[in-house]
Image (cartoon, coloured by chain):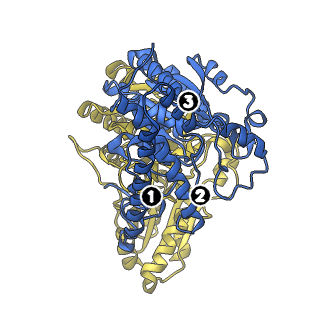
Chain colours: A blue, B yellow
Amino acid sequence: MVYVMEKEEYIKLYYQMVLIRHLEERAAELYQQGKIGGFLHLYIGQEAVSTGLISARKPQDRIITAYRDHGVAINAGIPPRQVVAELLGKATGISKGRGGSMHMADVTKNYWGGHAIVGTHLPIAAGLALGDLYQHTNGVTICMFGDGATNIGYFHEALNLSKVWNLPILWACENNQYGMGTAVDRASAVIEIRQKAEGYQIPNERIDGMNVLTVREAALAYLDLIRSGKGPHFLEIVTYRYRGHSMGDPERYRKAEEIKKWKENDPIGIYQHYLSDNQIAQQDELDDVETQVKADILDAVEFAESSPEPAPETLFDNVYVD
Amino acid sequence: MREAISQALWEEMDRDERVFILGEEVGVWGGTYAVTKGFYDHFGAERVRDTPISEAAIVGAAIGAALTGLRPVAELMTINFAFSAMEHIVNESAKLHYMFGGQFILPMVVRTVSGGGRQLGATHSQTPDAVFAHFPGLKVVSPGTPEDAKGLLKACIRSDDPVLYIEHATLYQARGEVSEGDYTIPIGVSKIQRSGKDVTLITYSKMLELSIKAAEKLAVDGIEVEIVDLRTLRPLDMGPVVESFKKTNRAVIVEEGWRSYGVGAEVATRLYEEAFDYVDSPIKRVAQKEVPLPYNRALEQLALPQVEDIVQAVKEVM
């Protein structure tokens, strides 16, 4: 089945990917200026993955991911202002300055974080899906995680449970080739991560994560199946991060040529060609998108920098509800 | 006590469709401590969910389901298995509400069972309650009477915060009156379980039973013991403890877990901080001896706190 979009939707995907790329580049600068603390994991190179996945969801579908979450947050619909403000630890950040880079969520957008301990959000994702099954919401949970997370016990407990309970969940593995600095073939007994889903009889597919439309179409097809009661499905989405695991990664584990080779397969470049070749958008329209992105980033950074710090008297807010 | 806990669960499930149970052997088996006996037949497989032996998945799934507005009651067969779900109990459930700026609400209860004394060996007999009480964001409740067990569990299920509700393996047979009708007992409120003027015994859960026996023995010698039952370890209600101590000026803290870094350490320090001027005698602790609990019956009992240890400690502070 071929899924066709309106022109605005095609442009929207381009906008999202360019926005994420620019936002991450700006975040790296802000980090180097000492304005962002803690860890900073950039999503550059992987933009097509969450852009494709999230473009396929319906409003009742939940998103949950790991710590490389800024791009996912943007795709889930959090305004860049609140993302950058959170990076700067400001009161106006999406998590009110309590979460930082790794912990962004927006419940109103059905985006459930931003979880920093590898693999721990997979059982939680199973619970989100259980909630939808129990309440007959017809929603599907899209759970994103890295290749590294498939080596920890939580992954296996969660996949098993999802199959035993026939949960409405799409397991979406972003295989970016490395868990921190350890290559997949040095850390995982199987190099094709999707094979791990076989062990739980979960239907699965390994797809190109550098092509946003490939990701989108695979997600649409699986979401339809899951929504119709067919239980959990698994996508291994092969991608690559251009930057280090986090800021300050000496990158001794890979060669410059490898990065260069992947950059020739750039998700934004591929999509740009697709839009031109199929005469969906002219170059000047794409340039306009880039201009818009730059303005939006400028606005977001200005907003974040001029936002107040959280007030000291709010330190104890939200430890408990009751 | 078993019946009181069971009643609380049943009544809450009856009252609120959002409440459901998940855990190992909670359904077809009826619960390894028989707390959920009959639930599966009455409420069905959707609301009484048997799980694989996957503690992290049990607590993780409870967190996720709670985030969608349900009110899960997860059962971990014993607290010793809670270590396999430690990440989800202390590093997720305790933090999600705060860390996302108040957006996440997790109305979930994890029921589990602490305590030694059944010759189950070192890995199956621990009382690590204080470990869990260390983490802000989590509430830790551990009742010592059937009345409190029922009222507190109902309050926990109705609470919008994650709660670890710790039962005791050898208290299920404990007998006691339970109030009529639908009642709750607030989380985070300590209670005077016995009045006296000479010394304050501070305790909770199984050790309440032993403390009452010790108090009865001491009464024969003319020593009137006041017993404060903490009932909740976090948030800790020191009000009745301090008030009692200001009257008696003497205190013994009795817990089943190990002495080091324990409940006694916390309560004693707070008494020194909050009521130093009232101290007439060094505050004493009665706790488990610092060994992994042995299997041999006599050795196990030697390591666990006994009524005589409490009596002795009280005499030492007099």
Q: CA distance from mark 1 to mark 2?
A: 14 Å
Frontmost of labels 1 and 3 is 3
A282 or B177, nearer to the observer:
A282
Judged from the image, the secondary structure of the residue bearing numbered disc 2 is loop
Residue at the spot 32% in from the left edge and 44% down from the top edge = A108
Q: Position of residue B256 (x, y in %)?
A: 55, 55
A312 or A222, nearer to the observer:
A222
Q: CA distance from mark 1 to mark 3?
A: 27 Å
Q: Which residue is mark 1?
A: A84
User: Quick check: marks 1 and 2 in contact, CB under 8 Å?
Assistant: no
Chain label for disc 1? A
Frontmost of labels 1 and 2 is 1
For residue A39, the mark is: 2
Q: Which residue is mark 3?
A: A211
- Earlier along the polypeptide chain: callout 1 or callout 3? 1
Frontmost of labels 2 and 3 is 3
In which quarter of the view is residue B240 placed?
bottom left
Vertical comparison of B190 with A116: above or below: below
Q: Position of residue B204 (x, y in %)?
A: 45, 56
Amino acid type, residue under disc 3 in the picture? Asn
Chain label for disc 2? A
